[in-house]
Amino acid sequence: MRFVLPKGRLLSGSLEILKKAGIRLETPKNRELIVKNGGYELLLARSFDVPVYVEHGIDVGIAGSDVVEERGSDVLVPLELPFGKCRLSLAMPKDNVVDVEEMDGFRIATKYPNLTKRFFEKKGIEVEVIKLHGSIELAPRIGIADAIVDIVETGNTLKANNLIEIEKIMDVSALLLVNRISQKTKFEEVNKLVLKIKEVIKNGS
Ligand code: PRP
């Protein structure tokens, strides 16, 4: 079986839950991005790319629900995992807060253009979305955006950048992803893994 895990904040939780489910994966050394682990192969990818790899043939992956929703990924999601809990929220500079209903024409910086557009469309508000790849909080600080849509976990990053959370757009959690074909061709193996992880979650260990 081939696994793809995200580099970054979900990696340690992902390795841990797999280990508890009996799959011990060594992370690649140096700058290698792929490593063989006994009968398994582990790929490390950017978080936004994980569902893409699973869509295109890697058997199993772990990614945040934010990324899966944003990409509209065609993957199976057999389980929500008990880590990577955070939220996707709209935030604004503390000294320049307006009601969401008054945001017509606002420029919104985000890594999540699709979820952002959907959120404002539902409210009938037209905004300009500025797609960035990271450090989103910089954009309002230097005046290229009026607000941001980004992940909030502890809220420390918002605070440090004089931003205030206005509205939660969605709750986020890590998800187990399975390739549609693998679910059929490797049914036994995939099913065993899902059941084991379920058990780990149930036992809270
Ligand atoms: C995420 C997110 C915020 C921060 C929120 O960024 O985009 O910047 O974490 O966490 P907090 O509420 O606990 O402060 P990440 O560190 O993943 O990197 P990025 O800024 O490059 O996207």
Image (cartoon, rainbow, N blue to C red):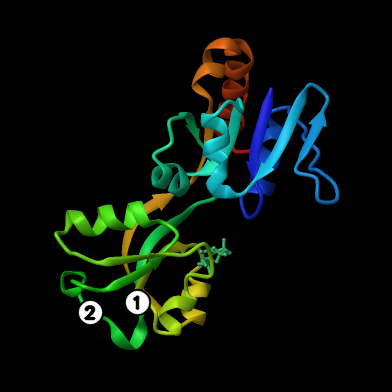
Q: Give the residue at x 77% y 35%.
A: 25
Q: Residue 98 carries which label?
A: 2
SS at mark 2 in the image: loop
- The one nearer the camera, 204 or 155, is 155
Give residue 35's quadrant in the image. top right
Q: Left of 63 or right of it: where is 150? A: left
- Residue denoted by label 1: 92
Give residue 182's quadrant in the image. top right
Mark sitting earlier along the chain (2/1): 1
Q: In this view, does 116 lie above or below 138?
A: above
Q: Left of 107 or right of it: where is 192? A: right
Image quadrant occupied by the C terminus: top right
Which kind of residue does numbered mark 2 sit on? Val
Q: In this view, does 100 lie above or below 19?
A: below
x, y (%) of residue 16?
A: 70, 41
Disc 2 and disc 1: Cα gap in Å?
Answer: 8 Å
Kindly tell me whether residue 82 is visible in this rendering. no
- The one nearer the camera, 170 or 21, is 170
Q: Give the residue at x 34% y 69%.
A: 108
x, y (%) of residue 164?
A: 37, 77
Which kind of residue does numbered mark 1 sit on? Met
Q: Give the residue at x 61% y 49%.
A: 46
Farthest right residue?
A: 30
Tag 2–tag 1 contact (CB < 8 Å) = yes
Image quadrant occupied by the N terminus: top right
Residues packed near mark 1 inside 10 Å, few (<14), some (14 to 19) or many (20 plus): many
